[in-house]
Image (cartoon, grey):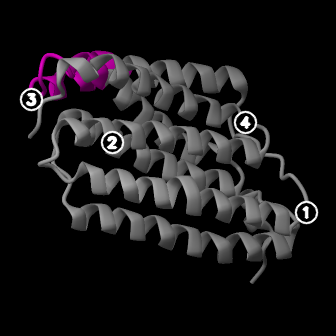
């Protein structure tokens, strides 16, 4: 397990905040193109953290992880999603199952849960420099889970899965858990598989209903 050096703490804190804010605004986005941009911002923050740590400690495999993140999440994934939106020649509006007040209350409760309950337990095993950053990273994970279940659109839910994966990797990197090349390759392959499945599912849903709203699946009759 590596220790985050003191000179990287300001950068790590900034990136931690960016990941959380990007995840938060993914709930509020009203266009799928904005969701994709926010996912790219979140992925960029993750890639910068991995690069910064790898330059400080070349012995770990974080440089390979950063390159894979850049290739898959900053290039392949955005191209895939924007090409899909262009293919159907329209901006799909997105919505949540919950109202704005309920959403804000839920995010507040999840953040409080991260700071008061979960983070103190994990912080026991973390270094003193990393400990204060863990609650926000955990809040990003919980917010990503909520994003998956709160979005009506299939694409929004898919991006919620990918945002959750980013948040988990970000937390793991803060904790200093070593990334093997095989693990990062598996994550990249997992992301590609998600996109392949999504391409088929989104096309079928849109062809049948003219909408990305998965709640419309209840209209299907045997």
Say whether residue 33 is left or right of residue 86: left
Q: Tell which circle, 2 or 1, labels the residue nearer the N-terminal end.
A: 2
Rounded to the nearest angstrom, the CA distance separating label 2 from label 3 is 23 Å
Residue 141 seen in the current view: yes
Tell me if 127 is positioned left or right of 88 in this view: left
Would you say 113 lies left or right of 153 here?
A: left
Residue located 80% across and 60% down the image? 85
Instruction: Give the SS element for disc 2.
Output: helix
Q: Which of the numbered marks, if any, corresponds to residue 125?
A: 3
Q: CA distance from mark 3 to mark 1?
A: 50 Å
Q: Is residue 133 magenta?
A: yes
Q: Secondary structure at mark 3?
A: loop
Circle on res. 51: 2
Image quadrant where one finds the C terminus: bottom right
Which region shows up in magenta?
A: 113-134
Determine the secondary structure under disc 1: loop
3 or 139: nearer the eye?
Answer: 3
Ranked by sequence position, the earlier of labels 4 and 3 is: 4
Residue denoted by label 1: 89
Does the residue at mark 4 contact the one at mark 2 (Cβ under 8 Å)? no
214, 21: nearer the viewer:
21
Return the x and y of residue 98 as percentages of the image width and height.
68, 34
Of the image marks 4 and 2, the number of the one nearer the N terminus: 4
Q: Of discs 2 and 3, which sits in the foreground?
A: 2
- Residues at marks 4 and 1, CA–CA distance in whole angstroms: 19 Å
Q: Looking at the rendered structure, which numbered label has been put on residue 29?
A: 4
Q: Quadrant of residue 119?
A: top left
* Mark pair 4, 3: CA separation: 36 Å
């Amino acid at each position: 397990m590596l220790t985050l050096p003191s000179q990287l703490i300001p950068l790590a804190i900034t990136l931690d905040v960016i990941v959380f804010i990007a995840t938060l605004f993914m709930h509020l986005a009203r266009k799928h193109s904005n969701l994709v941009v926010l996912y790219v911002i979140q992925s960029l923050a993750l890639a910068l953290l991995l690069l910064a740590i790898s330059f400080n400690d070349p012995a770990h495999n974080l440089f390979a992880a950063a390159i894979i993140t850049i290739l898959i999440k900053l290039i392949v994934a955005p191209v895939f999603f924007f090409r899909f939106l262009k293919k159907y020649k329209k901006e799909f509006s997105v919505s949540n199952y919950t109202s704005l007040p309920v959403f804000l209350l839920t995010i507040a409760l999840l953040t409080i849960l991260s700071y008061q309950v979960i983070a103190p337990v994990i912080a026991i095993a973390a270094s003193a420099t990393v400990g204060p950053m863990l609650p926000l990273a955990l809040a990003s994970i919980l917010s990503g889970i909520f994003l998956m279940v709160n979005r009506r659109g299939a694409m929004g839910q898919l991006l919620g899965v990918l945002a959750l994966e980013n948040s988990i990797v970000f937390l793991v990197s803060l904790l200093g858990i070593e990334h093997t090349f095989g693990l990062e390759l598996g994550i990249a392959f997992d992301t590609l598989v998600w996109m392949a499945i999504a391409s088929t599912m989104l096309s079928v849903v849109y062809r049948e209903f003219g909408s990305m709203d998965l709640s419309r699946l209840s209209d299907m009759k045997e």
